[in-house]
Image (cartoon, rainbow, N blue to C red):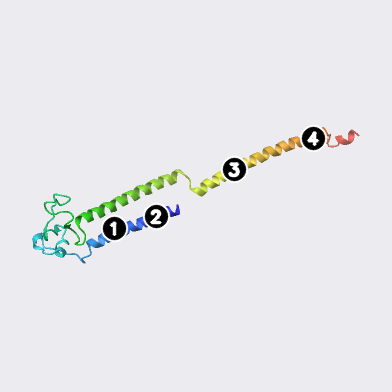
Amino acid sequence: MISFTTGRQTLTTSVLFCAVVLCVSFVSQGGCQTSSPTTACSAYKTCDTCVPHAKCLWCLTNSTCTDYPVSWLLPPASVCKLSQARWGVCWMNFEALIIALAVLCGTILISTIVCCCCCCCCKKHPSGPERDVERFARKREEIRQRAEERKGERKARHDEIRRKYGLIGDADHPYSKFENE
């Protein structure tokens, strides 16, 4: 259980680290960069000036900055191949960005499902030490009952032997042994 918890903490730490790296990579250029609404994306001549603008997409194939096709979630191959497209940062292509975000979302989703399942299972079954204490209490009770049965059997045998040799007389009066003499 300890290794699972440590693994979950490591996984959570890794996911948080990846999320921070992605956030920092999108904001790595420094402060807010604003452009006038009249500046067209084609006016930007380098990747570093093009990608900070969310509406612009840099294509390495022909080294041009084009308007991001907002009607499509992913830019079509006619605009630029995903492996050659840059959006947000110059050092990561659009294909790798999509894969990284998909892995991050999948990891978060799977972690959430695993945590929910673990919580449900932990509520159904008592934890190990509680279960062990309960099992030991049952065994102790069984041993005590068997000991009581054996004690009753021994007492019955001893009483029978005492009756056989006349050591037990009338229970009504304790001096019955002396009256017989």
Which amino acid type corresponds to the residue marked 1 in the rendered image?
Ala
Q: Amino acid at mark 4?
A: Ile
Q: Which amino acid type is marked by label 2?
A: Gly
**CB under 8 Å between discs 3 and 1:** no
Q: Earlier in the sequence, mark 3 or mark 2?
A: 2
Q: Which mark is residue 139?
A: 3
- Provide the secondary structure element on which disc 1 rests: helix
Quarter where residue 94 is shown: bottom left
Q: CA distance from mark 1 to mark 2?
A: 18 Å
Is disc 3 placed on a helix, strand or loop? helix
Mark sitting earlier along the chain (1/2):
2
Visible residue check, residue 170: no
Q: Which residue is mark 1?
A: 19
**Label 2 SS:** helix
Q: Residues within 10 Å of mark 2 (few under 14, many from 20)?
A: few
Kindly identify which numbered label has been placed on residue 130.
none
- First in residue order: circle 3 vs circle 4: 3
Q: Is residue 48 left or right of residue 6?
A: left
